[in-house]
Image (tube, rainbow, N blue to C red):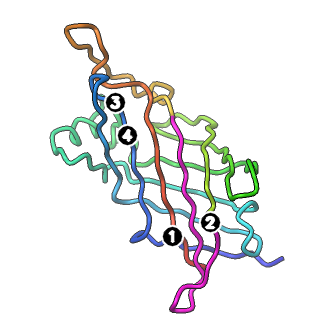
Amino acid sequence: MATTKWVLDPTHSEVEFKIKHMMISTVTGNFKKFDATVETEGEDFTTAKVTFTVDVDSIDTKNEQRDGHLKSVDFFDTANFPEFKFVATKYENVDNDGSYEVYGDLTIRGITRNEKFDAEFGGVIKDPWGNTRAGITITGKINRKDFGLTWSGATETGSLIVSEDVKIHVGLEFVKG
Protein backbone atom coordinates (compact mmCIF):
# COMPACT_ATOMS: atom_id res chain seq x y z
CA MET A 1 0.00 0.00 0.00
CA ALA A 2 1.20 3.54 -0.75
CA THR A 3 2.52 5.81 1.96
CA THR A 4 0.38 8.87 2.62
CA LYS A 5 1.82 12.05 4.09
CA TRP A 6 -0.39 14.28 6.22
CA VAL A 7 0.26 17.98 6.87
CA LEU A 8 -0.85 19.61 10.11
CA ASP A 9 -3.49 22.33 9.78
CA PRO A 10 -2.45 24.62 12.67
CA THR A 11 -5.50 26.87 12.32
CA HIS A 12 -7.72 23.94 13.28
CA SER A 13 -5.43 22.42 15.90
CA GLU A 14 -4.58 23.14 19.54
CA VAL A 15 -2.27 22.07 22.36
CA GLU A 16 -3.64 22.81 25.82
CA PHE A 17 -2.76 21.89 29.39
CA LYS A 18 -4.38 22.28 32.79
CA ILE A 19 -2.74 22.21 36.21
CA LYS A 20 -4.04 22.77 39.71
CA HIS A 21 -2.95 25.98 41.42
CA MET A 22 -2.85 25.92 45.23
CA MET A 23 -5.01 22.82 44.89
CA ILE A 24 -8.18 24.95 44.77
CA SER A 25 -8.32 26.15 41.16
CA THR A 26 -7.08 25.22 37.72
CA VAL A 27 -4.79 27.21 35.43
CA THR A 28 -5.14 26.59 31.72
CA GLY A 29 -2.43 27.25 29.20
CA ASN A 30 -1.58 26.45 25.61
CA PHE A 31 1.26 26.42 23.17
CA LYS A 32 0.90 28.58 20.09
CA LYS A 33 3.56 26.87 17.95
CA PHE A 34 3.70 23.14 17.29
CA ASP A 35 4.08 20.76 14.37
CA ALA A 36 3.63 17.12 13.43
CA THR A 37 4.87 14.83 10.72
CA VAL A 38 2.55 11.94 9.99
CA GLU A 39 2.83 9.13 7.47
CA THR A 40 0.25 6.36 7.12
CA GLU A 41 -0.33 3.38 4.90
CA GLY A 42 -3.21 4.65 2.80
CA GLU A 43 -5.57 6.42 5.22
CA ASP A 44 -5.12 3.92 8.07
CA PHE A 45 -3.99 5.93 11.10
CA THR A 46 -3.31 2.77 13.12
CA THR A 47 -0.20 2.46 10.91
CA ALA A 48 0.85 6.09 11.48
CA LYS A 49 4.43 7.10 11.99
CA VAL A 50 4.03 10.25 14.09
CA THR A 51 6.50 12.80 15.37
CA PHE A 52 4.97 15.73 17.22
CA THR A 53 6.94 18.75 18.45
CA VAL A 54 6.02 21.77 20.56
CA ASP A 55 7.90 25.07 20.68
CA VAL A 56 8.00 25.51 24.47
CA ASP A 57 8.80 29.23 24.17
CA SER A 58 5.31 29.70 22.66
CA ILE A 59 3.64 28.93 26.02
CA ASP A 60 0.69 31.16 26.88
CA THR A 61 -1.17 31.11 30.20
CA LYS A 62 -2.58 34.64 29.74
CA ASN A 63 -0.10 35.94 32.32
CA GLU A 64 3.26 37.26 31.09
CA GLN A 65 4.97 36.95 34.48
CA ARG A 66 3.87 33.33 34.91
CA ASP A 67 4.87 32.50 31.32
CA GLY A 68 8.32 33.93 32.01
CA HIS A 69 8.64 31.81 35.15
CA LEU A 70 7.56 28.69 33.23
CA LYS A 71 10.24 29.39 30.58
CA SER A 72 12.94 29.80 33.26
CA VAL A 73 15.27 27.17 34.72
CA ASP A 74 12.73 26.61 37.52
CA PHE A 75 10.49 24.86 34.99
CA PHE A 76 11.06 24.27 31.27
CA ASP A 77 14.45 26.00 30.84
CA THR A 78 13.61 26.94 27.25
CA ALA A 79 17.11 28.30 26.63
CA ASN A 80 18.47 24.74 26.91
CA PHE A 81 15.35 22.69 26.07
CA PRO A 82 13.41 24.61 23.40
CA GLU A 83 10.99 21.84 22.44
CA PHE A 84 8.89 18.93 23.65
CA LYS A 85 8.80 15.90 21.39
CA PHE A 86 6.47 12.92 21.14
CA VAL A 87 7.15 9.92 18.89
CA ALA A 88 4.32 7.39 18.73
CA THR A 89 5.39 3.76 19.18
CA LYS A 90 2.15 1.75 19.48
CA TYR A 91 -1.64 2.01 19.06
CA GLU A 92 -4.28 -0.14 20.74
CA ASN A 93 -7.93 -0.15 19.73
CA VAL A 94 -10.09 0.36 22.83
CA ASP A 95 -13.45 -0.19 21.12
CA ASN A 96 -15.05 0.15 17.70
CA ASP A 97 -16.06 3.82 18.02
CA GLY A 98 -12.65 5.35 17.19
CA SER A 99 -11.18 5.18 20.70
CA TYR A 100 -7.53 4.17 21.00
CA GLU A 101 -4.65 4.21 23.41
CA VAL A 102 -1.51 5.76 21.97
CA TYR A 103 1.88 4.93 23.43
CA GLY A 104 5.01 6.86 22.65
CA ASP A 105 8.23 8.42 23.78
CA LEU A 106 7.64 11.86 25.27
CA THR A 107 10.68 14.08 25.77
CA ILE A 108 10.45 17.13 28.03
CA ARG A 109 13.48 18.96 29.36
CA GLY A 110 15.81 16.30 27.94
CA ILE A 111 14.07 13.42 29.76
CA THR A 112 12.34 10.78 27.64
CA ARG A 113 9.66 8.49 29.04
CA ASN A 114 7.19 6.14 27.41
CA GLU A 115 3.71 7.53 28.08
CA LYS A 116 0.17 6.42 27.27
CA PHE A 117 -2.56 8.78 26.08
CA ASP A 118 -6.18 8.34 25.09
CA ALA A 119 -6.92 9.09 21.44
CA GLU A 120 -10.18 9.63 19.64
CA PHE A 121 -9.94 9.30 15.88
CA GLY A 122 -12.51 11.64 14.34
CA GLY A 123 -12.25 10.05 10.91
CA VAL A 124 -11.27 11.02 7.39
CA ILE A 125 -13.46 13.29 5.25
CA LYS A 126 -13.41 15.25 2.01
CA ASP A 127 -13.82 18.97 2.65
CA PRO A 128 -15.83 21.31 0.34
CA TRP A 129 -12.62 22.29 -1.48
CA GLY A 130 -11.66 18.72 -2.38
CA ASN A 131 -9.02 18.20 0.34
CA THR A 132 -8.92 15.01 2.38
CA ARG A 133 -8.79 15.78 6.12
CA ALA A 134 -8.36 13.72 9.28
CA GLY A 135 -8.94 14.67 12.91
CA ILE A 136 -7.52 13.26 16.14
CA THR A 137 -7.98 14.29 19.77
CA ILE A 138 -5.38 13.20 22.34
CA THR A 139 -5.97 13.48 26.08
CA GLY A 140 -4.11 12.30 29.12
CA LYS A 141 -2.19 13.15 32.22
CA ILE A 142 1.50 13.23 33.06
CA ASN A 143 3.41 13.80 36.27
CA ARG A 144 5.58 16.87 35.73
CA LYS A 145 8.20 15.65 38.23
CA ASP A 146 8.88 12.63 35.99
CA PHE A 147 10.36 15.13 33.52
CA GLY A 148 12.53 17.09 35.93
CA LEU A 149 9.95 19.81 36.54
CA THR A 150 10.44 19.74 40.28
CA TRP A 151 9.98 23.39 41.31
CA SER A 152 7.54 23.54 44.15
CA GLY A 153 6.32 25.71 46.91
CA ALA A 154 3.83 25.39 49.72
CA THR A 155 1.11 27.57 51.16
CA GLU A 156 0.90 28.44 54.86
CA THR A 157 -1.25 25.35 55.40
CA GLY A 158 1.22 23.07 53.59
CA SER A 159 -0.72 22.69 50.33
CA LEU A 160 1.29 22.57 47.12
CA ILE A 161 1.28 25.73 45.02
CA VAL A 162 1.48 23.72 41.79
CA SER A 163 0.15 20.20 41.41
CA GLU A 164 2.35 17.37 40.12
CA ASP A 165 -0.29 16.16 37.64
CA VAL A 166 -0.73 17.98 34.35
CA LYS A 167 -3.76 17.28 32.17
CA ILE A 168 -3.13 17.44 28.44
CA HIS A 169 -5.56 18.04 25.58
CA VAL A 170 -4.33 18.05 21.97
CA GLY A 171 -6.70 18.48 19.04
CA LEU A 172 -5.12 17.95 15.62
CA GLU A 173 -6.44 18.27 12.10
CA PHE A 174 -4.43 17.09 9.12
CA VAL A 175 -4.68 17.55 5.37
CA LYS A 176 -3.60 14.75 3.07
CA GLY A 177 -0.39 15.89 1.35
Is 41 placed above or below 103 here?
A: below
Please report contact status of discs 3 and 4: CB closer than 8 Å, yes or no: no
Horizontal and vertical percent position of residue 21: 28, 28
Q: Main secondary structure of the magenta part?
A: strand
Residue 65 image-quadrant placement = top left
Question: Which is nearer the N-term, disc 1 or disc 3?
Answer: 1
State the mark number for residue 20. 3
Residue placed under numbered mark 2 in the picture: 38
The kind of residue tagged 4 is Lys
Residue visible at 31% across and 49% down?
Answer: 59
The kind of secondary structure element at disc 4 is: strand
Question: Which is nearer the N-term, disc 2 or disc 4?
Answer: 4
The kind of residue tagged 2 is Val
In front: 112, or 128?
Answer: 128
The kind of residue tagged 1 is Leu
State the mark number for residue 18. 4
Residue placed under numbered mark 1 in the picture: 8
